[in-house]
Amino acid sequence: MIEKSSLSEQMSAQQLLSLLEQAVLPLYQMSVVKDESSPKLVLAYSGGVDSEVLAYGLSVFAQKHPHIACLLIHVHHGLSANADTWVQHCVTRAGHYQLPLQVERVNVDKGPRQSLEAQARDARYQAFDRYLNPGDILLTAHHQDDQLETLLLALKRGQGPKGLAAMGVMQAYKQSWLLRPLLSISRDQIEQFSVQYHLTHIEDESNQDNSYDRNFLRLDIIPRLKQRWPSIAITAARSAALCAEQQHIVDDEVSHRLPQWLVLASDENALMTESSGFKLNGFGQLSAAWQALLFRGYLIHCGVSLPSQAQLQQILSQLLAAKDDANVTIQWGEYHVKRFARVAYVLKNSELETPPSSQLTADFISLVNGDKADMMCEIGQHQYHLSQQTSADIPLLAFPPTNSNITICFGAVGSIKCYPQFATSQRQKPRELKKLWQECNIPPWRRQQIPLVFYDDVLVAAIGLWIDKRYLGQAGQQGISLPLF
């Protein structure tokens, strides 16, 4: 049975202003009270009909609330021959609205496994981020039909309640807020408003290219759905809201259960090189659903991009099935998951790179020679301070014998031996380097990142861990202060 069609109610300027006030003012007041500062409103302004209508509404809002700073940001992607013309349009309209405008030019390079749409979106939001201070409010012109597109795309991708919740009117965005005040307004209402108030806007020719999934839905699928079910955008939004409610309940339960599975840097058994980890002891006894929810919660806690459902299942399978002494490494995108001592860790690929040693060696030689007073050394998640000192209270590395060759390198054969002096203890017998890595709980992926200090061919210290007791500074004499384990 075909539903009866009903015309969308026209939206007035007063209704648009009310939508903005209802969305913005409570959040603005909360930010002012919390931070004792005045956040600004930042509008993602493409110049298309949706953002043009919202820019008009923002101009009315700014006249009524002049104490609230507003900013329009137009992103020039460089993907269209008309991009410069669109900039001129936005400059002209911003002047008409008496709102400040910032034009950001970005480069969009299509990656091998990421769509041009996704790359452009990422570049766009990175541009917005440059203008957002903590507490600021980013406004986007997403509307009810965009919500339907998002929901259909989530179905196509096989997403669960989180994806089917689609877009919310308000959400935390990094240290700022993201608001979508037009989410209850249809595309028809927006276009009618534009005609009624004689607004000019740009037409992005790429919106007619149905090789893009969103355009395919917008041009070919949604019109047919609306012809059959005119209210489908409204009912789909209701479904998205119900999914969001369910997801909120799940997220709340995960937030209560997750802490018992985390290893934080402040914990007694934490690795000195990592900021957080995920305990695996007892994890395999949970249901598969809770395993996925909790580990996904850990990844969100770490602030990383989430893997697909298939990738997540592969990660969990390998983490739980591998033998205790096995080195587990799973990669997706720009991240790795590794396992050490029954704890899983997520790391960026860049964190696993071995740093160059030449500059560190040069800085250390300058420190020994007295050409610089101190230096910083980065190991994993920590920065260490090295300096010349005279102290009887803490172990110091003695200066090298005259004409010694000083080098700092990353990695050495595991059979090399030394007599380690730690912060509060020492070893009387020589210990192999590979044994010391284990004793200090240094995971395999960090062992090539610990700076090792050599005087000629002798390993005299591992920065952040130990000094060879044969090279300890004498009481009352100057030496190099190194952080010790």
Image: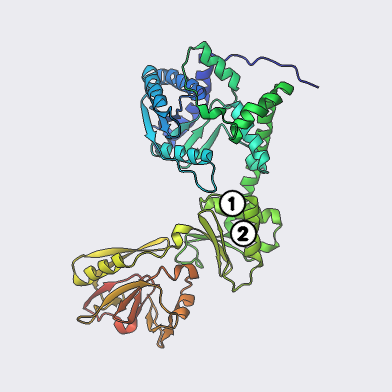
Residue type, numbered disc 1: Pro
User: What x and y, as percent, mark residue 161?
Assistant: 67, 41
- Left/right of residue 360 with respect to residue 173 in the rendered view: left
Q: How is the image coloured?
A: rainbow
Give x and y (percent) for residue 25: 48, 26
User: Quadrant location of the C terminus?
Assistant: bottom left
State the residue position of label 1: 307
- In this view, 93 is above or below 73: above
Q: Residue at x 52, y 51 (%)?
A: 304
Q: CA distance from mark 1 to mark 2?
A: 9 Å
Q: Can you see residue 399?
A: yes
Choose top left, top right, bottom left or bottom right for residue 246. Answer: top right
Q: Is residue 37 visible?
A: no
Asked whether, in this view, residue 58 is left or right of residue 163, the answer is left
Q: Which mark is residue 315?
A: 2
Mark 1 vs 2: CB contact within 8 A: yes
Name the quadrant containing residue 128.
Answer: top left
**Mark before the other along the chain sequence, 1 or 2:** 1
Q: Position of residue 405 (x, y in %)?
A: 25, 78
Considering every residue shown, the one lying at the far front of the view is 81
Mark 1 Cα within 10 Å, few/some/many (few <14, many 20+)?
Answer: some
Q: Secondary structure at mark 1?
A: loop
Q: Residue at x 46, y 79 (%)?
A: 434
> Foreground: 275 or 256?
275
Q: In the picture, residue 63 is in which quadrant?
A: top left
Residue drawn at (69%, 27%) of the image: 235
* Tag 2: amino acid: Ile
In the depicted structure, whether residue 8 falls above or below residue 79: above
Total number of numbered labels?
2
